[in-house]
Image (cartoon, rainbow, N blue to C red):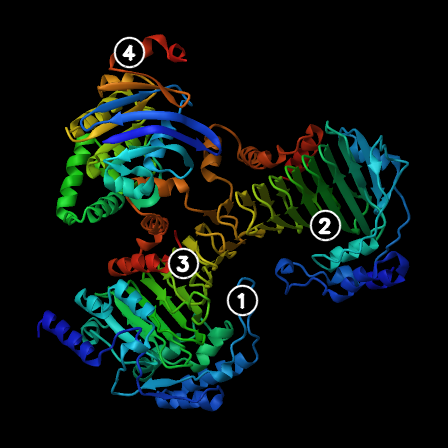
Amino acid sequence: MLEILNLHASVEGNEILKGINLSVKAGEIHAIMGPNGSGKSTLSNVLAGHNAFEVTKGSVLFEGKNLFDLSPEERAWEGIFLAFQYPVEIPGVSMTNFIKTAVEAKYKYQEKDAPSPAEFLKMMKEKQAMVGLAKSLAGRSVNEGFSGGEKKKNDIFQMAMLEPKLAILDETDSGLDIDALRIVAEGVNTLKKPDNAYIVITHYQRLLEYIVPDVVHILHDGKIVKTGDKSLAFELEKKGYDWVK
Amino acid sequence: MTEKSKDKDIIDDLEKNEYKYGFSSNIESEVFPPGINEDVIRKISAIKEEPEFLLEWRLKAYRHWQTMEHPYWAHITLEKPDFQSISYYAQPSNKPKYDSLDEVDPEIISTFEKLGIPLEEQKLLAGVAVDAVMDSVSVHTQFRDQLEEKGVLFCSFSEAARDYPELIQKYLGSVVPYTDNYYAALNSAVFSDGSFVYIPKGVRCPMELSTYFRINAINTGQFERTLIIAEDDSYVSYLEGCTAPMRDENQLHAAVVELVAMNGAEIKYSTVQNWYPGNKEGKGGIYNFVTKRGLCKGHHSKISWTQVETGSALTWKYPSTILKGDFSTSEFYSVAVTNNYQQADTGTKMIHIGKNTKSTIISKGISLGKSNNSYRGLVRMAKTAENARNFSQCDSLLIGSQCGAHTFPYIDVHNKTATVEHEATTSKIADDQIFYCNQRGISTENAVSLIVNGFAKEVLSKLPMEFAIEAHKLIAISMEGSVG
Amino acid sequence: MQNLDTYIHSLSEKNIAPEVLATYNSLDIPNKKMEDWKFRDTQDWFQGAYNFSPASILTSRDVKDSIADISYDALLVFENGLYKSDFSQPQHIQLEDRKKSSETDFVNKLEVANEICAQDGARIHVSNSESSQHILIASFYSGADTYAFQKNTVYIESGSQLTITEIHISLSNSVRVNHALTIHTEEHSSCEYTTVHSLHNDAQFIQHVRIQQEAESKATYATFPVSGKYIRSWVQVDKVGEQAHTHLNGLFFPILKEHCEQYIFVNHLSPSCETHKLYKGLANDSGFGVFSGKVYVARDAQQTNAVQTNKNILLSDTAKIHSKPQLEIYADDVSCSHGSTTGQIDKDALWYMQSRGIAYAEAIQLLLSGFINDVVQTVSIESVRERIRTAIVHKL
């Protein structure tokens, strides 16, 4: 599904990613762990197409398509979803209107008829219940005045609505208490299907107790320095990041 | 006759007339030769069969106008119009005849299509009365009988002058005297037509009253005069919307609106203003000088102004309220979008005189292209305004680096128990917000439109439903081509 | 005794640049038809008869009485715009000669009059001063019907710092003062200038301040018109270099028939500059206060950050305050805001304090002291801060 080959990327002239190689197949969950500044968020932003990050070398193929030929919204339509570390507040734009615009754009790209208002509302209700997002939030502006936990749940709710092929969860666990973490993780697990894949980016092993990865990668100084199964995460937790340096 | 078939008749009637707003229709008009003098004013008054007092009033206004100087404003670039090159009266003949649509700028037609015209039909089906003012004379008055049952008077100003002269004599100029300003004086001398609304005591007007104004005949200035009187404990919601066809020369529009609210009465006045703004090079477009003022005359009266301003090359407009009655309240909600070379200088005046009066001002300015968008407002707490309160919020959004956004609030407080709060911010759309939308599959253009509509939401939500939808579309259209 | 025009024409023409005189003659007398003068006509400043060369009466006792409570590193004393070396302690402060300018960029006729008539003033030039010194300027105005001119110039060279306090003191009732100040901060320099007016209740004072800031310089200008019949301050800041930061603070408190006006214009001409404005007003009796602030952001001044705050409280039925906080913005990547509130003392707070046993009058004192506290606190020299606080509290 996703093939990353020798990816180099920089921001404001500083090279952050220094040759990433990663292959993700449908049905897999990959965890990427690393200390602060190792390039985790840069990787997720590069995959989603943020223009502050410059790709200097390497290639990324998504379902056989060159990702760098696609605009951020085209990547979204193709099925890449980024759950943000810090979801953005958009004052005045209601959640309902926002997600409706996004869903309709995707259907249009896929040349399918968008769901009727009734179907859409039904879908919203179901998915909100799934991630435990209060119904009242739908009428509010996107992320405005949401608590940290609500923002994260809201991102997972959007993921449920957009049904991506590849979801990248960027430090989704940061700022969540244990209950909120469990609810978010349950939502993520429910959405897991044989034909989609996850990249879970995290600093701590905690999240991986709930979302169990097939493969764990350790990122350090812009490179993947170790790859293993889920036991690698436990080992890392015990020994600390100094171990990989 | 059932309600439905009645509506149908009206629609048929409209279709027969083929009256579509905004089309540059080539109606045979009786147009005065350009120029203004006392004879022109006498002639206007004679054609309209006006009572003597009205002619006298017009002449007084004209004589006063001649003594006035053309105003100068710091944030508007304008040459003084040549008032002798304007024709002051045009009357459509009985048989409208249309030429082909090819004469109209296709851009404007496509704009109309995007807006989902025909609007009249939508309005009629929704049960909204339409009083269409074509050029200077009212050609359509709907639902009049139904309104009359309730005692509501809703007619053209000319008719009102003939049929209810005592009301006109009592209230005309009572809120905006002809001495008020240059363009109000000019309007008082030569006003062509407009709407008159009278809501009797205790009556809630059963429908939204709506009017379309348009400018039509070449070189004909348009000088509407609107007067709305709400007696004790009555309620009325009045909608005004405008579109105008393409013109090369700048056209002048100088309207006067007067509102009077008695004890416990409420007037809600909403405007969607979409006059032709000129082309991308800043050529053409309407000059819009409007004096709108309401008087909260009675205690516990309320006047709300809601406006969405997207059109006109030049807008100069400050819908204002004099809060005279104790416990009276007023609100001003405004969204102004300027693009290309448009200039807008708009805002409000809230003059607090009565005790415990309260006003709220929410103004949202959006500037794009090479345009300039200014908020200019005055909040005055007179010495008598015990416990009066005002809250103002003026936010500006800049899109692009060639435009300007300005805020000029004047706050005068002469009473120690009064409270005035004013806040203003200027910002741009954050790149992070755009990226967040992009990542969810929303294109940049749509994201900007979403965010801008979100920015203006507080105001748009104050509009009656059918207007709100139109306003959303209008805002999107006014921003087209400027993002990317 | 003569009027201003006669006085100007009696001055030796050699000392006046012809361009400047031409500008003076071409400008109208500021009057109520002008936007920034609509509350005060200045006909009397041009046509009244005054004494332009009063005799000196200043004594060391006057100086001592007026500034005993203030600490300083250097002291410059002026009387009616002339330097008094007997009373001054300039230490190693560099004082420059008065340069007559042929600049013709003046905001109004009164500012030009200052350029023509001011013979003297504090002309401070600082270089190689990394630790900030405190210079106290004591400007006295004396004599009957005196019309005094003074022009101070402050030039801070790159990397230097300076703190200045100027106290304006009248020794007689009927003086009027036309004062000007220019401050120039070179790159990486910093200047704090605090003005305090302590004038008789018939004294009148008009001031024009121009501040020019180069890149990464910091300027703080604060004004405390404590007393005087009419005090008008006009300040313009031009940020000609990037990342120039400015703090502008003020507190005005007209009582009786005092009239106080503050006009503050900040021009963001370069990117990444910051401005913080904090002006507070109190008005009692028939006091009349005006705040007019503007932040202008030029097209190139991206990443501007400007915050304007104006808060006012009216304490009587006949007091008036006019507030006009404006923004004029031509750059899109900016964060500009202004807030203005005018109201009365917080009644809930008053009630809360009374219910805790604090007497009404005392509660009001406490609340108003709280209201003025943040502005007064911006002054870095403690003895100056206390001087201002005492004077304001005394007025309450």
What amino acid does circle 2 point to? Answer: Gln
Measure the alpha-carbon separation of dots 3 and 1.
18 Å
Task: Give the crowd class for mark 4: few <14, some 14-19, many >=20 residues within 10 Å.
Answer: some
Q: Badge 2 sits on which subunit?
A: C
Q: Give percent across and percent down for residue A211.
A: 22, 21
- The foreground one among A152 and B39 is A152
Q: Give percent across and percent down for residue B301.
A: 35, 60
Instruction: Say whether marks 3 and 2 touch (CB < 8 Å).
Output: no
Residue mark closest to the camera, 1 vs 2? 1
Pointer 1 and pointer 2 on the same chain: no
Q: Badge 1 sits on which subunit?
A: B
Marker disc for residue B337: 3
Residue mark closest to the camera, 3 vs 4? 4
- Quadrant in which the C terminus of chain A appears: top left
Task: Tell me the residue that label 2 is attached to.
Answer: C207
Task: Tell me the residue that label 1 is attached to.
Answer: B77
Q: Dot 1: what SS? A: loop
Q: Badge 3 sits on which subunit?
A: B
Measure the alpha-carbon separation of dots 3 and 4.
57 Å
Residue depicted at x 36% and y 34%: A46
Marker disc for residue C172: none
Measure the alpha-carbon separation of dots 2 and 4.
72 Å
What amino acid does circle 4 point to? Answer: Phe
